[in-house]
Image (tube, rainbow, N blue to C red):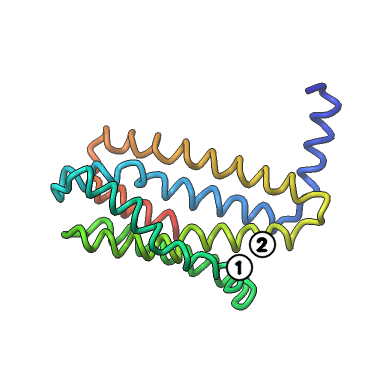
Amino acid sequence: MPSGRLIQAARELRCMPGQFWVLTLGTFTYVAAAALAFPFEAIYLRRYLGTSMSMIGVVFVLVPLAVMPVQFWGGALTDRLGRRVVIMLSVLIGVVWFVGFAFVQELWQVAALVAMESALGWPLFQTASNAMIADLLPPERRQQGFGVTRVAMNLGVVLGPALAGLALGWGASFRELFLAAAAGCV
């Protein structure tokens, strides 16, 4: 990219409203925190609950499919309750997900957590945050805004597991990772 185009792109990003950047930073933080634990959930279930990999697959595939119809009302809920309320609800569900995961004893508890998070967690967060981006940015800037937010999510997905790997290498437990993920979601 020629330096003139790079300077123009930087100017355009600086023109984005402050609320957009707060939302983008919050999205990055939420995704990075969740990614601290997400890659290690199956290992945890296998190692500490003795769950077969087949059952882990069933829980993480079939349970979300079963609650998928609930996700369709996310847009209506976002319009009715407001973007901020739905984002806060979905983040609260993320906290419950990770705290619950830290203390599960049985596979049915995991299935209940997966169902709750699949119906009311990340899908609602994405619906409400995307609606908020559309509210904050004029139509000609939305594509750029969605792109910036996607980059923030991708950075979080990369950074979270890397930090978790370091933490595990330094002796952190899976439970501590899950609790750290819950704290990061807050």
Image quarter of the C terminus: bottom left
* Disc marking residue 103: none
Q: Residue at x 42, y 60 (%)?
A: 118
Q: Quadrant of residue 133?
A: bottom right
Residue hosting label 1: 75
Q: Are marks 2 and 1 in contact (CB under 8 Å)?
A: yes
Q: Find residue 145 and report its horizontal and vertical position in percent.
A: 71, 48
> What is the CA distance from the residue labelled 2 to the residue labelled 1?
8 Å
Q: Residue at x 25, y 48 (%)?
A: 56
Q: Looking at this rendering, what residue extends furthest in the bottom direction?
A: 80
Side (left or right) of 50 relative to 64 = left
Side (left or right) of 119 relative to 149 = left
> Is 168 in front, or is 86?
86
Q: Find residue 96 and report its horizontal and vertical position in percent.
A: 35, 64
Q: Residue at x 23, y 45 (%)?
A: 54
Q: Earlier in the sequence, mark 2 or mark 1?
A: 1
Tell me the crowding category of disc 1: few under 14, some 14 to 19, or many 20 or more residues within 10 angstroms, Cα based.
Answer: some
Amino acid type indicated by mark 2: Ala
The mark lying in front, picked from 2 and 1, is 1
Amino acid type indicated by mark 1: Gly
Q: Is residue 85 placed above or below 146 in the rendered structure?
A: below
Q: Find residue 146 and report its horizontal and vertical position in percent.
A: 68, 48
Residue hosting label 2: 131
Image quarter of the N terminus: top right
Tell me the crowding category of disc 2: few under 14, some 14 to 19, or many 20 or more residues within 10 angstroms, Cα based.
Answer: some
Side (left or right) of 166 relative to 15 = left
Q: Find residue 142 and report its horizontal and vertical position in percent.
A: 75, 51
Q: Is residue 57 placed above or below 99 in the rendered structure?
A: above
Q: Residue at x 66, y 62 (%)?
A: 131
Q: Quadrant of residue 179?
A: bottom left
